[in-house]
Amino acid sequence: MEELSRRQVIAASGAVVAVGAVAGCSVYGKKKDEPSVTVATSAGQSAPANAVASKSQVPVGSGLIVGDKGVVVTQLTEGEFKGLSSTCTHAGCTVAEISDNLIHCPCHGSAFNLDGTVAKGPAAKPLPAKNVSVSGDFVVLD
């Protein structure tokens, strides 16, 4: 049996650590078993194919994270819906919570206002806008 040199052992250890770091980063900030949002149907109206939420699912002065669509829908004032990317501009994690009028990223503590602007770093750029509009009782991606 051939013996490994010290250099080979160190190189192999470094490779194992690198693989572990990459695997850890790929799941950091993601919630276990995060459910996708089911678009609520309205009486007599079926949801359009591009619907991300029913209007009733998005509280006024708050929002809804639709993880499987990569979008955050907020309702700043009654009937004023805004679409934002759910990907934090700091390190690419998915935002996880909306509370106290802020969209929170779990990775490094960034927070965004409901219009997507940065409320608290380390993120320096706002959440990118996603075009949404209202179609009947639904908020849809344009």
Image (cartoon, rainbow, N blue to C red):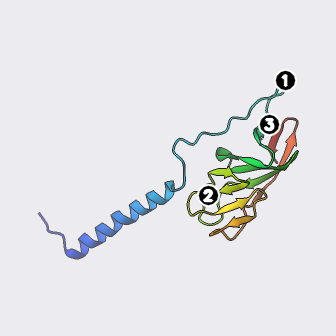
Q: Is residue 68 above or below residue 124?
A: above
> Which residue lies under the disc numbered 3?
56
For the residues labelled 2 and 1, the Cα–Cα distance comes to: 37 Å
Residue depicted at x 57% and y 43%: 34
Name the element at disc 3: helix
Q: Position of residue 96 (x, y in %)?
A: 62, 51
Residue depicted at x 62% and y 66%: 90
> Which residue lies under the disc numbered 2?
105
Is residue 127 or residue 77 the one in the foreground?
77
Q: Position of residue 141 (x, y in %)?
A: 79, 46
Q: Earlier in the sequence, mark 2 or mark 1?
A: 1
Quarter of the figure with residue 48: top right
Name the element at disc 2: loop
Contact between marks 3 and 1 (CB within 8 A): the answer is no
Outermost left residue: 1
> Which residue lies under the disc numbered 1?
44
Name the element at disc 1: loop
For the residues labelled 3 and 1, the Cα–Cα distance comes to: 15 Å
Question: Callout 2 environment at 10 Å: few (<14), some (14 to 19), or many (20+)?
Answer: many
Question: Callout 1 environment at 10 Å: few (<14), some (14 to 19), or many (20+)?
Answer: few
Q: Point out the frontmost of discs 2 and 1.
A: 2
Question: Callout 3 environment at 10 Å: few (<14), some (14 to 19), or many (20+)?
Answer: some
Contact between marks 2 and 1 (CB within 8 A): the answer is no
- The amino acid sitting under disc 3 is Ser
Is residue 88 or residue 57 the one in the foreground?
57
- The amino acid sitting under disc 2 is Cys
For the residues labelled 2 and 3, the Cα–Cα distance comes to: 24 Å
Q: Position of residue 80 (x, y in %)?
A: 87, 49
Contact between marks 2 and 3 (CB within 8 A): the answer is no
Residue depicted at x 18% and y 70%: 4
Number of numbered markers: 3
Quarter of the figure with residue 106: bottom right
